[in-house]
Amino acid sequence: MGAIVQSLFGSARTSTWYWEFLREELAPYPGRVSLVVRMVTASTLVVIIGMTFRIPYTAFAALFALVLSRESIEATANAARALVIGVVLGAAYVIFGALFALGDPMLRFLWVGGSLFLAFYTLSALSNYAAVARFAYLIVITIPLWDSHDSAASKVESTLWAVGAITIGSVITFVMELVFASFKRTGELSEAIMERLIAVEELLEHYADGDEVPVATRSKLTRLATVGTSRLRSILQRSGLAARNQQHMGAHL
């Protein structure tokens, strides 16, 4: 009986932890609704264009369009750039390597094994994870088509279609980011600073009233502390406000 009770207690505790984890991960924060709308819109447009023009590998393009959107235009542009570079390098590796090993089954087997080893090794060894992950991903999704009975020209064409479809998805995602950014009235730096000030204000109000700090406020502060201010510093550098402020202060001195 003790073992059964302990098992039930452990199961209940695991279920509670799981729901608490989901509640924290899915908790709304400033900009999250806009991010979700951009992701869904970009992915939907990619699927519509792919199905209209019957572009191969549309599913992969829609998947990348769904995960490319970030909280800022610069982050999305960097992710899209890394994706395109990774898939282009992956396509070049697959085409030249597969054509070299196409006539010999044993050489083909060794090339496939070596390619998979290279994909996993680069994921763990190189620092640019985004580009390397796309490089490895293209290798994985295009290796099976080189085992088909189509001609070599058809296989090369299919590989290039994979690169084109994923590139189209990246471009559409970035264009959607530009469109949504044109409707924003406040800058990214102002929004980020305002979010932090509001979170601190909520915390101080609860302390002043002697109330217990809600879980949502604690989660928000934990998330902001984990994220840090590196993104704010990069935004400030790109905006040129720091340089203009230094020039202004130098002129007054």
Image: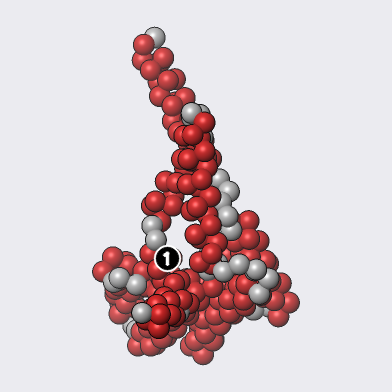
In the rendered image, residue 192, in percent from the top left (x then y), is placed at 51, 60
Residue at screen point 48% across, 53% down: 196
Residue at screen point 36% across, 15% down: 3
Residue at screen point 28% across, 65% down: 124
Instruction: Tell me if residue 160 comes above or below residue 22 in the rendering.
Output: below
Q: Nearer the viewer, residue 252 or 228?
A: 252
Which residue is outermost to the bottom? 153
**Which element carries disc 1, helix, strand or loop?**
helix
Instruction: Tell me if residue 127 comes above or below residue 199 in the rendering.
Output: below
Quarter of the view holding residue 103: bottom left
Q: What amino acid is at disc 1?
A: Arg
In the rendered image, residue 217, in percent from the top left (x then y), is placed at 50, 41
Can residue 15 be seen in this snapshot?
A: no
Which residue is outermost to the left? 125
Mark 1, Cα crowd under 10 Å, few <14 / some 14-19 / many 20+, is some
Can residue 32 be seen in this snapshot?
A: yes
Q: Please give left or right for residue 230 compared with residue 83 in the image.
A: left
Q: Please give left or right for residue 120 compared with residue 241 in the image.
A: left
Instruction: Tell me if residue 10 comes above or below residue 92 in the rendering.
Output: above
Quarter of the view holding residue 44: bottom right
- Tally the marks: 1
Which residue is outermost to the right? 52
In the rendered image, residue 239, in percent from the top left (x then y), is placed at 48, 77
Q: Which residue is mark 1?
A: 231
Q: Nearer the viewer, residue 239 or 49?
A: 239
Residue at screen point 49% across, 74% down: 74
Query: Which quadrant is the N terminus positioned in?
Result: top left
Q: Nearer the viewer, residue 128 or 204?
A: 204
